[in-house]
Image (cartoon, helix red, strand yellow):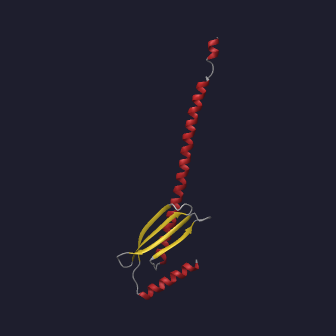
Amino acid sequence: MNYLAHNAGFSLVEVMVAILILGIALAGLTTGITTALGSSKESEQQTTAALFAAGQIETLRAEGGLVDGEKNGVCGAGDAPYRWKQTISPTTIEGLHEVDVVVENSGDGRLILDLKTMLFEPVADPATVRENARNKKKRSADR
C-alpha cells in the first residue's frame, strides 16, 4: 500500500522539467512575436516611403518644367518621421532627366528607400523653359 501512495503524484524533478520545457517554449514564442512586430513596422515604413517617393515623381511628371538640382523636405504625420531628398540631373540625351528620390528616417537618418527613374520633357524654346521654371517656383512658394 505504501508503494502505491508513493507513486500517486509527480515528483519534484518531473515538475521542474515540465516548467523548464514550458519556459523554453514561452521564450521562443516571445522572440517570434517580437520579430514579427519589428518586421511589420519596417514593412509599414517601407510602404509609406515608397508611396511618398512615387507621389513626388508623379507630381514632377504632372507639373512639368523640370529644373535640375536638389530639393529637401519632411513628410509624414505628427513629428514628420520621414525626411526626403529629390535630385534631378541631366543626362546625355537632351530633355531626358534622371530623378532620384531618397527617403530616410528622420530620427536616426537610416535610409528607407531610394527610388530612381527617368523623366522626359520635350525641349522647348528658351522663353518657354524660363516661364515654366517661374511658374513652378511660384507654385512651390504658394504651398
Residue 118, image x and y in percent? 40, 71
Picture mark count:
0
- Quadrant where the N terminus sits is top right
| Residue at x-position 53% and y-position 48% | 35
Between 72 and 122, the one nearer to me in the picture: 72
Residue 42 against residue 89 in the figure, above or below: above
Outermost residue to the top: 1
Side (left or right) of 6 relative to 84 = right
* In the displayed structure image, the side of residue 64 where residue 13 appears, left or right: right
Residue at screen point 57% across, 32% down: 20
Q: Position of residue 62 (x, y in %)?
A: 48, 75
State whether residue 2 is above or below residue 56. above
Q: Residue furthest front?
A: 108
Residue under the image location 42 percent in, 69 percent down: 117
Q: Is residue 7 left or right of residue 126?
A: right
Residue at 59%, 31% in the rendered image: 19
Residue farthest along the left direction in this orientation = 92
Q: Identify the image quadrant of the C terminus.
A: bottom right
Where residue 135 sits: x, y (%)?
Answer: 51, 83
| 32 is higher (above) or lower (below) than 102 | above
